[in-house]
Image: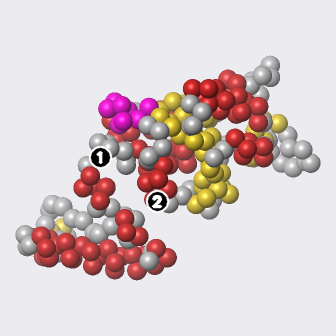
Amino acid sequence: MRIDILTLFPNMFEGFLNESIIKRAIAKESVIIKIVDFRKYSKLSNNQVDDTPYGGGGGMVLRIEPIYDAVMDIKKEDKDAKVILMTPDGIPYKQEMAVSLKDEKHLVFICGHYEGFDERIRSLCDMEISIGDYVLTGGELPAMVISDSIIRLLDGVITDTSLVDESFNDKLLDYPTYTKPQEFRGMKVPDILLSGDHAKIKAWREEKRIEKTKERRPDLM
């Protein structure tokens, strides 16, 4: 898979690309990630990429030209690249979307910034995604969140067992897990997990997933 991320702040991605699972996925060539500073596509003398909104109002709005040119450059290489806009009024992001997007060969994320973006930028996009009902300073963090959720699903990035036994599979949250020590300040590991009876452990875990989901996220059921 290839992922291009269009941003005004490429340095924000240094830690994301050079730590943990994402770093290993890049090293294994499971994914290629390119960070594109679309300020370089500005045709204005001061490399300006934003301007005041028509009709008045506070803040600055991203202009369409640099983003259009950046996307067209990518499309020259791959006309089938799927372009996704990070925006608070996009489709709420869910695990099912991560599962679907992992099968795409090439994703392009556009990170908005400032007060907003020229409405015509939407015409470049195949999809608009929101990671929640709140406002951030830009689309960089959402692009990292979505990229992470997709990359970890790619073949060979993490173990298949880890992918099966986790939250949101079958619309349920994950079961509780424990490790050593067996007892800590009066808090004990449930006896069933020490029994060695794998059938009973599996049944217990499934029961706990249902209980946990009913208690914390009944909307999922």
In this view, the residue in front, 140 or 198, is 198
Residue 191 lies left or right of residue 118; in this view the side is left
User: Among all residues in the image, which is located at the extreme front?
Assistant: 80
Q: Is residue 176 above or below residue 146?
A: below
- Judged from the image, the secondary structure of the residue bearing numbered disc 1 is loop
Quadrant of the rendered image containing residue 22: top left
According to the picture, the residue beneath numbered tag 2 turns out to be 96
Question: What's the residue type where badge 1 is placed?
Answer: Ile
According to the picture, the residue beneath numbered tag 1 turns out to be 158
For residue 28: magenta? yes
Total number of numbered discs in the rendering? 2
Q: Residue at (37%, 69%) from the top-left corner?
A: 170
Q: Position of residue 143 (x, y in %)?
A: 54, 44
Q: Position of residue 84 (x, y in %)?
A: 60, 45
Q: Residue at (29%, 42%) from the top-left corner?
A: 156
Q: Considering the image in quadrants, where does the N terminus appear?
A: top left
Report crowding for label 2: few under 14, some 14 to 19, many 20 or more residues within 10 A (C-alpha): few
Report crowding for label 1: few under 14, some 14 to 19, many 20 or more residues within 10 A (C-alpha): some
Q: Position of residue 38 (x, y in %)?
A: 66, 29
